[in-house]
Image (cartoon, rainbow, N blue to C red):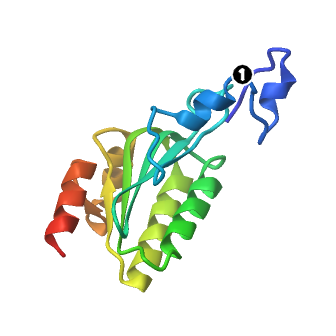
Amino acid sequence: MILTNTGNTERLVPGRRDPATEPAARTGTGSSRPDSELLTGSPAHPQALRLRVHRPEPGVAVVLMSGEVDLAGAPRLNELIRQRLTAAVLRALVLDMSEVSFFGSAGLELLLLAQSRCESRGIPMYLVPGHGVVARMLRLTGLTDRFATRETTAQAVAELRGAR
């Protein structure tokens, strides 16, 4: 990720947040549900990886992503998925990547690692690649059949409900 220096170096320091946008970043889309959380990227870079986790039902974690899944954001996403997979009550993971605007090799490696972790724990992982860069990368690498893909998050959750 390359940012131009506009003279405001406070916004360019990783890990620091702009106090003016801090409350807005925490509330995200207005969801006040206690079981949802929003993890945001830098406000100086609107394409930074944005993650939102919600639990539509007990044992199911849905990770919604938007922005760029690159070398800068992949470690955060990897840590988030690792934390969710170590939760004792997790019975399924859904990764919604339909809003991702850039998907590099680091993102592909992350998906393969998450799938491997899910398989080792016996937890199904559904991927919602959308119709953009994630779907294109999966087609180009021949990995489309490696993942259980669904058109929408709602479709994946409905399938999980039926599998009970």
Task: Determine which residue is flagged by label 1.
Answer: 20
Q: Quadrant of residue 118?
A: bottom left
Residue ID at (50%, 67%): 84
Q: Is residue 164 left or right of residue 113?
A: left
Horizontal and vertical percent for residue 94?
35, 59
- The quarter holding residue 79 reads bottom right
The structure residue drawn at horizontal position 19% and vertical position 66%, both measured from the top left corner, is 161
Residue 116 image offset from top left, x and y in percent: 44, 76
Decide which of 162, 49 is in the foreground and name it: 162
Q: Position of residue 58 (x, y in %)?
A: 35, 67
User: Does residue 14 sit above or below 56 in this rendering?
Assistant: above
Disc 1 residue type? Answer: Ala
Q: Is residue 3 left or right of residue 60?
A: right
Q: Is residue 111 left or right of residue 18?
A: left
The image shows residue 123, relative to residue 30, as above or below, that is below
Picture layout, residue 153 above or below residue 88: above
Q: Residue at x 41, y 73 (%)?
A: 90
User: Which structural element holds mark 1?
Assistant: loop
Local packing at callout 1 (Cα closer than 10 Å; few below 14, some 14-19, many 20+) is few
Q: Position of residue 36 (x, y in %)?
A: 47, 50
